[in-house]
Image (tube, rainbow, N blue to C red):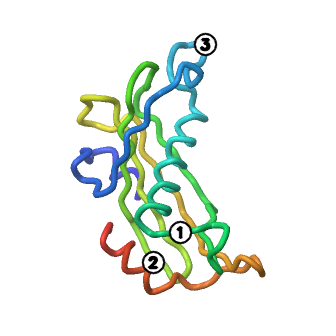
Amino acid sequence: MSEKLRNQRLKDFPYRISIPTRWGDNDMLGHVNNVVYYRYFEAIVVRFMMEVAGVDWLNDPSNPQAVESLCRFHRSLSFPDTVEGALKVEKIGNSSVTFGVALFGSDDEKPAATGHIVEVFVDANESKSVPITDDHRAVFERYL
């Protein structure tokens, strides 16, 4: 799934956030360290879940938890830059949702990195997967 994202443009992703790079994001080679890309992916998904899906991890009876992530690096990002983080829903299962994510440098048409994150909804008390609620499913369907 994620490989198809490499050829997509920022406009192809319905949810986007701006992520300013920080001095400490760069490694000794002068580009954003690979582990930081995963932090950017996490920021995109967490903001989407909070702002769009209305997830409240501390008070909801179930909450999404990451069970799989993948990042494909296509080219370097570097400080100082503002990264455009982008998200679309790739697949909705019974208890899981797969997000396609991409990172774009400023003024870039092609993504610097693409990947996916799979989130499974888990009962907060029993730590077992549960079906996605109808409300969350409706939100995710709008971002397919």
Secondary structure beneath label 2: helix
Identify residue for label 3.
Answer: 28
Point 77% across, 79% down: residue = 125
Which residue is at the front of the view, 117 or 59?
59
Residue 54: x and y, percent?
48, 69
Which residue is at the front of the view, 123 or 109?
123
Quadrant of the rendered image containing residue 82: top left
Which label number is shown at residue 55?
Answer: 1
Query: Tag 1: residue type?
Result: Val
Point 50% across, 84% down: residue = 133
Pointer 3 or 1: first along the chain? 3
Which is more foreground, mark 1 or mark 2?
A: 1
Distance Cα–Cα, label 3 vs label 1 = 37 Å
Query: Tag 3: residue type?
Result: Met
Distance Cα–Cα, label 2 vs label 3 = 42 Å
Secondary structure beneath label 1: loop
Residue 63: x and y, percent?
62, 72
Residue 122: x and y, percent?
66, 76
Identify residue for label 2.
Answer: 136
Q: Residues within 10 Å of mark 3 (few under 14, many from 20)?
A: few
Which residue is at the front of the view, 90 or 21?
21
Which is more foreground, mark 3 or mark 1?
A: 1
Residue 99: x and y, percent?
44, 61
Q: From this view, report whether residue 53 is shown above or below residue 13.
A: below
Q: From this view, report whether residue 102 is shown above or below residue 95.
A: above
Query: Tag 2: residue type?
Result: His
Left or right: residue 112 compared with residue 93: left
